[in-house]
Amino acid sequence: MQAEVEVDVENDSVAVAPAVAQAMTDGAKPRFITFEGIDGAGKSTHIEAVAAWVKARGVEVVVTREPGGTPMGESLRELLLAEAMHLETETLLMFAARREHVAQVIAPALARGAWVISDRFTDATFAYQGGGRGVPREKIEALADWVHPGLTPDLTLLFDLPREVAAGRMASSRELDRFEIELTDFHERVRAEYLRLAQAEPARFRVIDANLAPELISKELEKIISSL
Ligand code: TMP
């Protein structure tokens, strides 16, 4: 997607924040919503429904994902999901893709008052590269401060599920990528880090029991979205 407003890629803490603030005073209330969870938790199936509810209010909605969301981000995604690499390379590439994503898609959309729904964002780096691979939290915090200062989701929907259940859902459906084939221990560390993040920021996170039937999850999501 093309940026529709000018974004100062050198320093978006200056360029983006006032634009977002302006959009809010103009009556449009941009919202940044993220979906998170371990692989196989089922988050992606609910994103389009949530987008449709928001659209029904007459609001512009941008649905996107990480890693990805821009042509360069999608190329980096292919690399990241396929190639073995050093854990720091992996972390830096996640943030390189994110930098493009914020500059080209997320910041411009919020600045014009749209709602952005992203299938994963920086919490995934804390969970996967931090919790899963052991990259120190402070290093990820430093990268987040550098790449998207002042930009935090307004709402994060965390789909929580034990790894064994998630793995069962993914089995045989298709070829698994480099993260999905990681062992149970890895995914349990990812899950534990997600839950720690949710506990640390209860006002931002809603933990969804991803073991529930899809219709029940859908009802819960509708309630959460309608309260925004
Ligand atoms: P997806 O399958 O939900 O689109 O995510 C692709 C994979 O990338 C998933 O296994 C999680 C992983 N990932 C990270 O390890 N770190 C990140 O920062 C992001 C955004 C995704």
Image (cartoon, grey):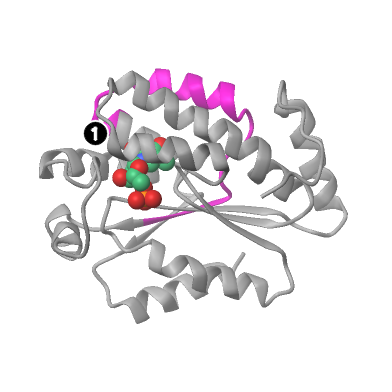
Q: Which residue is mark 1?
A: 132
Amino acid type at circle 1 is Gly
Q: Quadrant of residue 215?
A: bottom left
Which residue is drawn at the image coordinates 65% and 54% (left, top)?
Answer: 31
Q: Quadrant of residue 88?
A: top left
**Ligand 1 location (quadrant):** top left
- Looking at the image, can residue 220 be seen? yes
Q: Is residue 53 magenta?
A: no
Farthest residue in the bottom direction?
Answer: 215
Looking at the image, is 42 positioned above or below residue 15? Answer: below
Which residue is drawn at the image coordinates 67% and 40% (left, top)?
Answer: 104
Q: Is residue 155 magenta?
A: yes
Q: Is residue 225 left or right of residue 156?
A: right
Q: Is residue 175 left or right of residue 81?
A: left
Q: Quadrant of the C terminus?
A: bottom right
Badge 1 element? helix
Q: Is residue 191 left or right of residue 171?
A: right
Where is residue 210? Give x, y as percent.
Answer: 29, 65
* Label 1 crowd (10 A; few <14 / some 14-19 / many >=20): many
Where is residue 213? Give x, y as percent.
Answer: 28, 78
- Looking at the image, can residue 200 be seen? no
Frontmost residue, 5 versus 213: 5
Where is residue 43? Give x, y as percent.
Answer: 37, 61
Frontmost residue, 207 versus 97: 97
Frontmost residue, 60 versus 226: 60
Looking at the rendering, the stretch of residues picked out in magenta corresponds to 130-158
Looking at the image, is 194 positioned above or below residue 29? Answer: above
Q: Say if disc 1 is inside 8 Å of ligand 1.
A: yes
Where is residue 167? Give x, y as percent.
Answer: 15, 57
